């Protein structure tokens, strides 16, 4: 892709995100979401492969539908209350429609079907943007309207997301699809706590985005698209494979990694809110996610190709590791000891 074009699209992404997260008026928030959608489409379809074109088409249709529902929700609320302010979304029907619209934008169950397919058709770096940056504006809208949302509906969507994100990721062999189901599962954790402690949702999103960025950048450096390629990666890049192992364990939420922190705080808050059954269910369902993270980690570091094969021996990659991977991995592994400080910040 032409560098000037890429610069325009990335600037538009930043502009759209900034407009949405800084706006008070629904129409401005909708405008930012639309700019974001239009800016990411060329980045999805830049390879001109039929699967990439299909992914871009699916993404456009889903996001256009969700944006229409956001406008419909805000107009219904304005009709009944005379308010266009985002924080004044008080009408129950508007809250219900908005929850469906944002769930569609994020890929929460039952509106999740588009997300794995779009991620599979996109390049790895665009997949990283779709999994992290593109989810930030909708989450900020949920954050601003959290007082008006239905807790029962969000808890149901959250538990279903963690369950389906875990189950559907079990038999996948494509790394991008596995990361898509991982994203759906993590969104469930963010949604369940949104009404009770919105700042914890944002903290969870920041940490999730950091760990996911580390995994995607590592996979991009290793040029790995599926599990069979991952099995051969240890001989080429042992250091990157080790980094991948640690960040995957952090994404799974195992102590003493950073990924354990949001899960621990969310379970603690749910217990305070007398929602111990929901906390138990969501914790048990996250074991499904742990299984496929361990499967990825196993393929990356423990399985070695047989020595009797007749293919050419692949050389080690002697390129230095990207500094951003090193920084993100360090943060993904080491932030748990400062969790008391993070807890006081939020």
Image: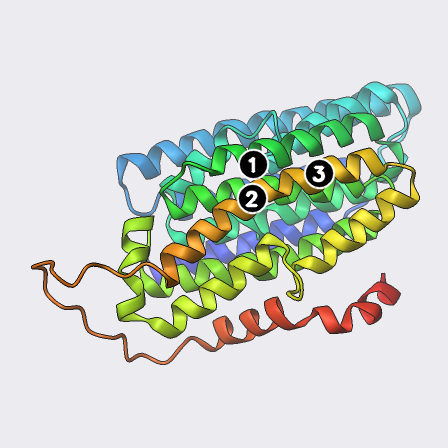
Q: Nearer the viewer, residue 282 or 160?
A: 282
Q: Which residue is mark 2?
A: 289
Q: Is residue 43 above or below residue 50?
A: below
Q: Is residue 197 above or below residue 214?
A: above
| Alpha carbons under labels 1 and 2: distance apart | 7 Å
Residue 28 visible here:
no
Tell me the quarter of the image containing the N terminus.
bottom left
Which structural element holds mark 1? helix
In the drawing, does residue 48 fall left or right of residue 260? left
Expressed as whole percent of the image width and height from the top left, the position of residue 164 reads 57, 31
Expressed as whole percent of the image width and height from the top left, the position of residue 204 reads 71, 53
Is the C-beta separation of discs 1 and 2 under 8 Å?
yes
Q: Which residue is mark 1?
A: 165
Which structural element holds mark 2? helix
Instruction: Count every numbered label the image shows and give the total.
Output: 3
Residue farthest left in this picture: 310
- Could you classify mark 1 by the number of other residues whose Cα lies within 10 Å: few (under 14), some (14-19), or many (20 or more)? many
């Amino acid at each position: 892709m032409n560098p000037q074009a890429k610069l325009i699209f990335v600037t538009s992404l930043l502009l759209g995100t900034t407009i949405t997260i800084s706006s008070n008026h629904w129409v401005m928030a909708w405008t930012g979401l639309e700019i974001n959608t239009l800016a990411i489409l060329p980045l999805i379809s830049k390879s001109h492969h039929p699967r990439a074109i299909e992914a871009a088409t699916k993404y456009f249709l889903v996001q256009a539908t969700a944006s229409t529902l956001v406008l419909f929700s805000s107009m219904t609320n304005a009709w009944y209350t005379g308010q266009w302010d985002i924080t004044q979304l008080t009408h129950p029907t508007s809250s219900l429609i908005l929850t469906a619209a944002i769930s569609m934008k994020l890929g929460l169950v039952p509106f999740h079907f588009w997300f794995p397919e779009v991620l599979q058709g996109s390049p790895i770096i665009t997949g990283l943007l779709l999994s992290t940056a593109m989810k930030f504006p909708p989450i900020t809208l949920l954050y601003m309207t959290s007082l008006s949302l239905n807790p029962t509906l969000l808890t149901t969507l959250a538990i279903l997301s963690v369950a389906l994100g875990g189950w559907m990721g079990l038999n996948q062999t494509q790394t991008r699809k596995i990361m898509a189901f991982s994203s759906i599962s993590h969104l469930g954790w963010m949604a369940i706590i949104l009404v009770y402690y919105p700042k914890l949702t944002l903290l969870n999103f920041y940490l999730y985005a950091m760990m996911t960025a580390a995994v995607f950048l590592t996979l991009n450096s290793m040029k790995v698209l599926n599990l069979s390629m991952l099995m051969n990666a240890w001989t080429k890049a042992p250091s990157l494979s080790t980094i991948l192992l640690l960040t995957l364990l952090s994404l799974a939420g195992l102590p003493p990694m950073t990924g354990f922190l949001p899960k621990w705080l969310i379970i603690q808050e749910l217990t305070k809110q007398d929602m111990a059954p929901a906390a138990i269910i969501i914790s048990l369902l996250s074991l499904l996610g742990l299984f496929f993270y361990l499967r990825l980690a196993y393929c990356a570091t423990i399985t070695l190709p047989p020595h009797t094969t007749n293919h050419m021996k692949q050389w080690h990659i002697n390129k230095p590791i990207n500094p951003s991977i090193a920084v993100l991995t360090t943060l993904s592994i080491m932030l748990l000891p400062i969790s008391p400080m993070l807890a006081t910040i939020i």
